[in-house]
Image (tube, rainbow, N blue to C red):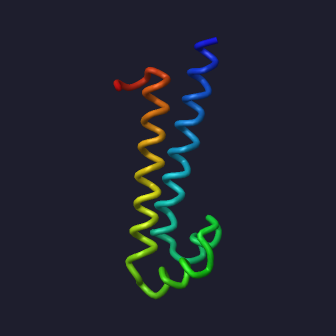
């Protein structure tokens, strides 16, 4: 049973880190990516205008996703607590 739990935590960590990476791609590729990721047209317009807010929010979300991924890997005992 614990092996199955570890596999689930590893899968969660992998998918979460992919989500974090996709968020970073929003910063790189701009407004269309914000819309594709569900942030909305307002965020896309702000990014296209060069405003700092979409980048800051996206970096915050990315950081949270990375922390969640690390917690999952810790729960799977692949990294230290």
Q: Is residue 22 above or below residue 72?
A: below
Residue lying furthest bottom: 49
Name of the residue lying farthest toward the top: 1
The residue under the point 62% across, 64% down is 37
Q: Position of residue 55 (x, y in %)?
A: 42, 70
Task: Identify which residue is drawn at 47% across, 39% down.
Answer: 69
Which quadrant of the figure has residue 8? top right
Residue furthest out toward the left: 80
Residue occupying image coordinates x 59% and y 33%: 11
Q: Quadrant of the N terminus?
A: top right
Query: In the rendering, at what x and y percent does residue 44 appear?
Result: 55, 79
Residue nearest the observer in this picture, 33 or 41: 41
Q: Residue at x 41, y 84 (%)?
A: 50
What is the number of callouts on the image?
Answer: 0
Instruction: Classify residue 12 as left or right of residue 75.
Output: right
Position in image of residue 36 (x %, y %):
65, 68
Quadrant of the image for the C terminus?
top left
- Above or below residue 35? Residue 20 is above
Left or right: 31 with respect to 73? right
| Residue 33 drawn above or below residue 15 | below
């Amino acid at each position: 049973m614990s092996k199955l739990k570890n596999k689930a935590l590893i899968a969660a960590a992998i998918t979460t880190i992919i989500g974090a990476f996709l968020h970073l791609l929003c910063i790189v590729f701009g407004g269309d990516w914000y819309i594709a990721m569900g942030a909305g047209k307002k965020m896309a317009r702000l990014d296209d205008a060069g405003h700092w807010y979409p980048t800051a929010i996206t970096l915050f979300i990315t950081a949270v996703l990375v922390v969640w991924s690390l917690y999952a890997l810790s729960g799977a005992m692949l990294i230290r607590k």
